[in-house]
Image (cartoon, grey):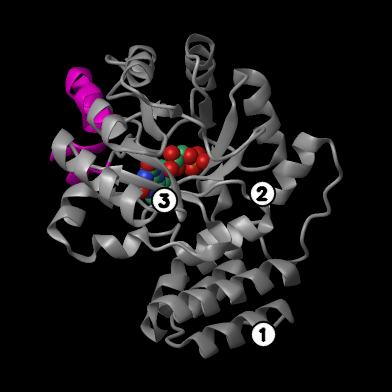
Amino acid sequence: MKLPFDGFPIMLAPMAGFTDMTYRALCREQGCDFTFSEMVSAKGLSFGGKSAELLETSPVERPCGIQLFGREPSIMADMAKRICDEYHGDVALIDINMGCPAPKITGNGEGSALMKEPLHAAKVIESVSKASSLPVSVKFRKGWDKTSENYLDFAKMAEQSGASMVTLHGRTREQMYSGTADWDAIATVKAALSIPVIGNGDVTDAKSALALKAHTNCDGIMIGRGALGNPHIFPEIKAAIAGMPFTPPTEQERMAIAIRHIEGIVAHKGPRSVVEMRKHIAYYVRGMRGASAFRAAATRASTAEEMVGMIRRFVEGGEF
Ligand SMILES: Cc1cc2nc3c(=O)[nH]c(=O)nc-3n(C[C@H](O)[C@H](O)[C@H](O)COP(=O)(O)O)c2cc1C
C-alpha cells in the first residue's frame, strides 16, 4: 500500500509522555516529514477511556501515524479499523508497537514481548493489515535479549504478514536504551526486505543521520531522544541530506520554540499541564551555560507565565 511520504523521510519517533500533539506540530513546522502518536493501547481504546485523547492530531501534522499496542489480534484489528474510519484524512498510517521494553507493557505480553512469540505477532500484523484501509507498519527491536536476536526473521514475517514498512530500533529489549544501537542489524534487514525499512537508534545530529543512512542504506530515519528539546534537528538533517548548508539556531531561537511549546501545551491540555513542560525544558537547555541551575529553578514554576518569564530571564543571562 502506498505510504504517505516520498523521498527519504526524516520522522519523529513515537515517545510516550513526550511526543504529544503540540510537540509533533512544532517538529513538523521545522521540517520533520512524518510524526507518530504516542503509543495507544488498543484495549484502552476499546473500553472507551482516555486513550482516545491520544488520537487527537493538529492540522499542521496531518496526516500522521497512530501507533497502537496490544496483543489480541481482534481488538487490534477493530481499533485499527475504527481509526481508519473515524480519523480518515487526519491519519495516514497505523503503526504497531512491537518494541516497547517497559515491564508494565511486556508483562502483558505486549510491545517487545511479542518478539518472543513471532507466530502470534504474525497474527496481530495480519489481522490489523486486513482490517486497515491505511498502510500498516511495525516497529520492533533486535530481539528480546542477546540470546534471541530474531530481528531478521521477524522483519520477514512482518512483510509477509502485510506490513508496508518496518522500523528497526537496533537494540534488544534487554538493553532498554543502554549501549549503542546496532546499525548492522538495520543494514541486514534493509538488504532482505522489499518494503521500506526505517532506521532508528542514536541519531542525534546531521553527522549521525548521514552515517546511519550510509551504513544501512535505509529508506528513512526515525529520531527519538535526539529530537527532545531540539525540533531544529529536522532542518539540520534535511539540509545535510540535500547537501545544503545549515545555520544552527541561536539560544534565543531555541528558547523561542520552548516558549511556543509551553503556550501550545497549556492551550491544548489546560494551565495545570505546565508541569509537563518541566521535563521538556530540561532538554531545551541542554548544553547551555547555567542549564543545571535553570533546570532546578524551572521545576518550581507552577504557571505558564512564570515559566515563560524564567526562560526570558535565562536567555538574557539572568542568574538562577
Ligand atoms: C521517553 C521515551 C518514550 C518512548 N515511547 C515510545 C512509544 O510510545 N512507542 C515506541 O514505539 N517507542 C517509544 N520509544 C522508543 C523510541 O521511539 C525510539 O525507538 C528509541 O528512543 C530509539 O531511538 P533514539 O535513539 O533516536 O532515541 C520511547 C523512547 C523514549 C526515550
Residue at the disc numbered 1:
313
Q: Is residue 148 left or right of residue 137?
A: left
Separation of residues labelled 2 and 1 (CA atoms):
27 Å
* Residue visible at 27% across and 15% down in the picture: 148
Label 1: state its secondary structure. helix
Q: Secondary structure at mark 3?
A: loop
Task: Kindly identify which residue carries mark 3.
Answer: 15
Which residues, given as a range, are shown in magenta?
102-125
| Sequence-first disc among 1 and 3 | 3
Residue 109 visible here:
no
Magenta stretch: dominant SS?
A: helix
x and y percentages locating residue 255 in the rendered image: 66, 71
**Distance between the Cα atoms at labels 3 and 2?**
16 Å
Callout 1 touching callout 3 (CB < 8 Å)? no
On the image, the x and y values in percent for residue 210 come to 70, 30
Is 114 a magenta residue?
yes
- Residue under circle 2? 234
Residue 51 is marked as none
Residue situated furthest right in the rendering: 245
Q: Using the rendered image of the protein, determine whether residue 71 is visible from the camera's viewpoint.
A: yes
Indicate if the residue with disc 3 has its beta carbon within 8 Å of ligand 1. Answer: yes
2 or 1: tag closer to the N-terminus: 2
* Residue type at tag 3: Met
Q: Quadrant of the C terminus?
A: bottom right
Amino acid, disc 2: Phe
Assess whether mark 2 and mark 3 are in contact (beta carbons under 8 angstroms). no
Badge 1 amino acid: Arg
Q: Quadrant of residue 232?
A: bottom right
Q: Nearer the viewer, mark 1 or mark 3?
A: 3
